[in-house]
Image (cartoon, rainbow, N blue to C red):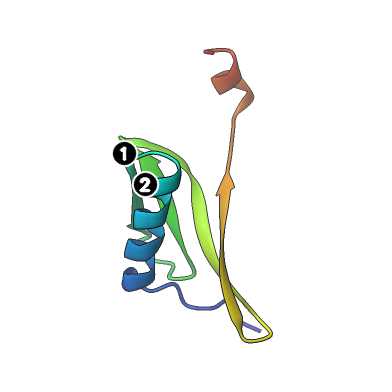
Amino acid sequence: MSAPVFHRDEAAKVEKFLRAKLNPDLKVQMRQRADECAEIYKGAECLGVVSKNVEEGETSYSFTITILDIDLEEV
């Protein structure tokens, strides 16, 4: 089974939600080659990815953030 396609209009809605709930500087950017997810940026830094999930007729979006151990040393 292939991953659900993540469309630009959905990316815009997710971006609006993330800006309202987390940080107004967040930006959702579609990947150039893959259409099953998009990247979440704050400025020039990629924080993680958001992917679309469709299960039993319901759609949800998962935001996965990756934190490198070297990034933890900076705080």
Task: Tell me: 29 left or right of 71.
Answer: left
What amino acid type is highlighted by mark number 1? Asp
- Can you give x and y, in whole percent of width and height, for residue 66 in the image? 58, 39
Q: Name the residue under label 2.
A: 19
Please tell me whether residue 62 is drawn above or below residue 58 in the rendered image.
Answer: above
For the point 50% across and 57% down, the residue is 50
Quadrant in which the C terminus appears: top right
Task: Tell me: 45 left or right of 4.
Answer: left
Task: Tell me: 72 left or right of 24.
Answer: right
Front position in the image: 10 or 43: 10
Q: Determine contact: label 1, label 2, CB under 8 Å.
A: yes
Rendered image quadrant of residue 55: bottom right
Front position in the image: 13 or 43: 13
The crowding category of the residue bearing disc 1, from other C-alpha atoms within 10 Å (few below 14, some 14 to 19, many at least 20), is few
Secondary structure under tag 2 reads helix
For the point 31% across and 35% down, the residue is 44
For the point 36% across and 64% down, the residue is 13
Q: Name the residue under label 1.
A: 25
What amino acid type is highlighted by mark number 2? Arg
Across the whole image, how many numbered discs are drawn on residues? 2
In terms of sequence position, does the residue under pointer 1 or pointer 2 come before the other? 2
For the point 43% across and 70% down, the residue is 35
Please tell me whether residue 9 is drawn above or below residue 18 in the rendered image.
Answer: below
Quadrant in which the N terminus appears: bottom right
